[in-house]
Image (cartoon, helix red, strand yellow):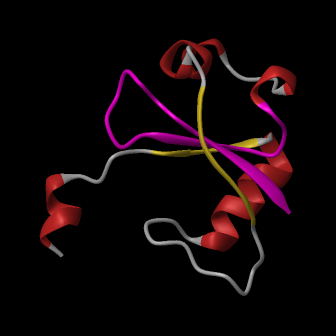
């Protein structure tokens, strides 16, 4: 599945994975506010056999299929210690 990843300019280390480009996405107002202006960080092809550094690939793919987006929040201090 092709994926567009946008970076939040308002909240550090926060990313939004979309199954469509920003202009075509149907997002909740809270996400639109957090990611406007939309800054494309990268595009990539997601595959269940591929791994992501901070996210579970199967969860990302499931969210993209079912809701059209996946939100990656900044890691907590506890996550950083592990």
Q: Is residue 22 left or right of residue 80?
A: right
Q: Is residue 13 left or right of residue 70?
A: left
Depicted 39 relative to depicted 45: above or below: above
Residue at the image point whose x is 85% and y is 53% from the top: 65
* Residue at image coords 54%, 22%: 35
Q: Is residue 25 left or right of residue 53?
A: right
**Residue at left offset 33%, top offset 46%:** 74
Expressed as whole percent of the image width and height from the top left, the position of residue 29 reads: 63, 12
* Residue span colored magenta: 1-21
29 over 69 or under it: above or below:
above
The spot of residue 48 in percent (x, y) is 75, 80
Q: Is residue 58 above or below residue 17?
A: below
Residue 56 found in image quarter: bottom right
Look at the image and say whether residue 9 sits in the magenta stretch: yes
- Image position of 37 (left or right of 65): left
Query: Which corner quadrant holds the N terminus?
Result: bottom right
């Amino acid at each position: 599945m092709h994926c567009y990843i946008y970076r939040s300019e308002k909240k550090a280390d926060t990313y939004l994975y979309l199954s469509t480009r920003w202009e075509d996405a149907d997002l909740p107002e809270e996400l639109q506010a957090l990611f406007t202006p939309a800054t494309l960080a990268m595009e990539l092809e997601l595959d269940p056999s591929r791994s992501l550094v901070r996210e579970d690939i199967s969860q990302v793919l499931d969210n993209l299929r079912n809701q059209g987006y996946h939100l990656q929040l900044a890691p907590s201090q506890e996550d950083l210690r592990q």
